[in-house]
Amino acid sequence: MMDEKTVDEMKKHKGLKLGVVAVLLLCGVCWVYAAGYYHADDIAVAAMSSATDVTVEQKGNAIAFIPEDAETGLIFYPGGKVEYAAYAPLMRALADNGVLGVLVRMPLNLAVLDVNAANSIPEQYPQIKHWYIGGHSLGGSMAASHAAKYTSTYDGLVLLASYSTADLRASGLPVISIFGSEDGVLNMEKYAEYRRNLPAAFEERIIEGGCHAGFGSYGTQDGDGVPTMTGEEQIIETVRLLTAFLGTTKE
């Protein structure tokens, strides 16, 4: 007959084994979930080539699109389970309009795993006088959470098909919120609920005919609506709205 000490040791050993199995199962589930991400398409890959007026460079976990004589920069967090390079066409178009854009790669393509990824970026580009931060979908929400903690670093926040769960009402940050009229992914109930977290003077712009995936270049997203405009057209309209907000619109 086993004594109480032996029984206790067996229970501890069994509990440890179950704990290890649970952790492995959780890791496996997370890996399977994250592995099915949206890849940047050929259009996005082509947009990552340097040109006469725009230099594209990789620095650590970020890709920067650097126009000549830029004074305004935008740090951009990708949407959940979307490869960060998928937003290259948007960043390239902004760079063509004088905005230095920095795309941040996230662990497992989930910005929630590195909310403060932007911290080291501004110091790498001392020529930039005005920094903005933003993102698409989940990336926008995480950018908002980051901005709420580092308000003095930024001149404004950009939300694309997104909302802020952080309270920014007293932040003093200018905010622009843009989404497509045909977006089938953005939870409009939560969007309406969290609108209260934004400053009273925030700008809201709706792109007629635009969809959720149209801000990037990664194909059709599950659950999205059917757009009545091309992805290129949605990016052009997004850039028009953003350059007006950033104050970089070319005459």
Image (cartoon, helix red, strand yellow):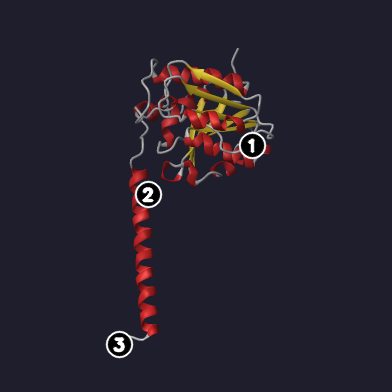
Mark 2 surroundings: few (<14), some (14-19) or many (≥20) residues within 10 A: few
Q: Which residue occupies the foreground of this view, 71 or 211?
A: 211
Give the number of the mark in front: 2 or 3.
3
Q: Is residue 124 above or below residue 200?
A: below
Q: Secondary structure at mark 3?
A: loop
Whole-angstrom CA distance, mark 3 to mark 1, is 74 Å
Residue 121, picture quadrant: top right
Q: Tag 3: Cα neighbours inside 10 Å, few (<14), some, or many (≥20)?
A: few
- Asked whether 134 or 182 is in front, the reply is 182
Q: Position of residue 159 (x, y in %)?
A: 54, 29
Secondary structure under tag 1 reads loop
Q: Nearer the viewer, residue 8 or 132?
A: 8
Sequence-earlier tag: 2 or 3: 3
Mark in the foreground, 3 or 1 = 3
The residue where tag 2 is placed is: 30
**Mark number, residue 1:** 3
Q: In the drawing, does residue 8 fall left or right of residue 190?
A: left
Tell me the kind of residue under disc 3.
Met
Instruction: Give, as a three-letter code, the residue at label 1.
Output: Pro
Q: Secondary structure at mark 2?
A: helix
Picture disc at residue 126 = 1
For residue 135, side relative to residue 228 (left or right): right
Q: Residue at x 46, y 30 (%)?
A: 187
Instruction: Name the N-terminal-most of marks 1 and 2.
Output: 2
- Separation of disc 2 and disc 3 at Cα? 43 Å
Q: Is residue 32 above or below residue 194?
A: below
Residue 44 picture location, percent across and down: 39, 28
